Image (tube, rainbow, N blue to C red):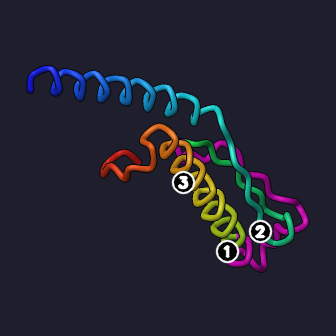
Amino acid sequence: MAKGLGNIMKQAQLMQQKMERMQQELETRQVEASAGGGMVTAVVNGRQQLVDLKIEASVVDPEDVEMLQDLVLAAVNEALKKSQDMAQQEMSKVTGGLNIPGLM
């Protein structure tokens, strides 16, 4: 029984090390999403951090700030979703498809 528990603990440590490496790798990976036909583009890393936001000058209209706000929200939210999907796919490689609460 103790030997089996030792193996489980060793496997858990290896999985934890793999997850830490994957999280470090995710920081360097980026996804991009745009809105308004490319007028606003958001770039997010695998840790769900916004790292770049590009806004075409032609979409900046002081008379229609709401449209720009909507485009920024749409681009950022889509980039965040892509980033979360990417992170979830990468983590499932480490966990073997197990859904472990609190990992992501």
Image spot of residue 34 (x, y percent): 77, 62
Do the residues under discs 2 and 1 have CB atoms within 8 angstroms? Answer: yes
Question: How many residues crowd mark 3 within 10 Å: few (<14), some (14–19), many (20+)?
Answer: some
Amino acid under label 2?
Answer: Ala
Amino acid under label 1?
Answer: Asp
Q: Which mark is residue 35?
A: 2
In the structure shown, which secondary structural element does the residue marked by tag 1 occupy?
Answer: helix
Compared across the picture, whether 28 is left or right of 11 comes to right
Image spot of residue 65 (x, y percent): 71, 74
Image spot of residue 61 (x, y percent): 82, 72
Q: Which mark is residue 82?
A: none
For marks 2 and 3, give the one nearer the viewer: 3
Q: Residue beneath label 1, please?
A: 70
Residue at 82 percent across and 67 percent down: it is 60
Compared across the picture, whether 94 is left or right of 6 comes to right
Of pointers 3 and 1, the one earlier in the residue sequence:
1
Calculate the distance from the C-alpha at mark 2 to the C-alpha at mark 1.
9 Å
Q: Residue beneath label 3, please?
A: 84
In the picture, the quarter occupied by the N terminus is: top left
Say if 45 sits above or below 64 in the image.
Answer: above
Query: Residues in magenta?
Result: 47-68
Residue at 45 percent across and 27 percent down: it is 18
Of pointers 2 and 3, the one earlier in the residue sequence:
2
In-front residue for pair 75/83 = 83
Compared across the picture, whether 13 is left or right of 82 comes to left
Calculate the distance from the C-alpha at mark 3 to the C-alpha at mark 1.
21 Å
Magenta stretch: includes residue 64 = yes
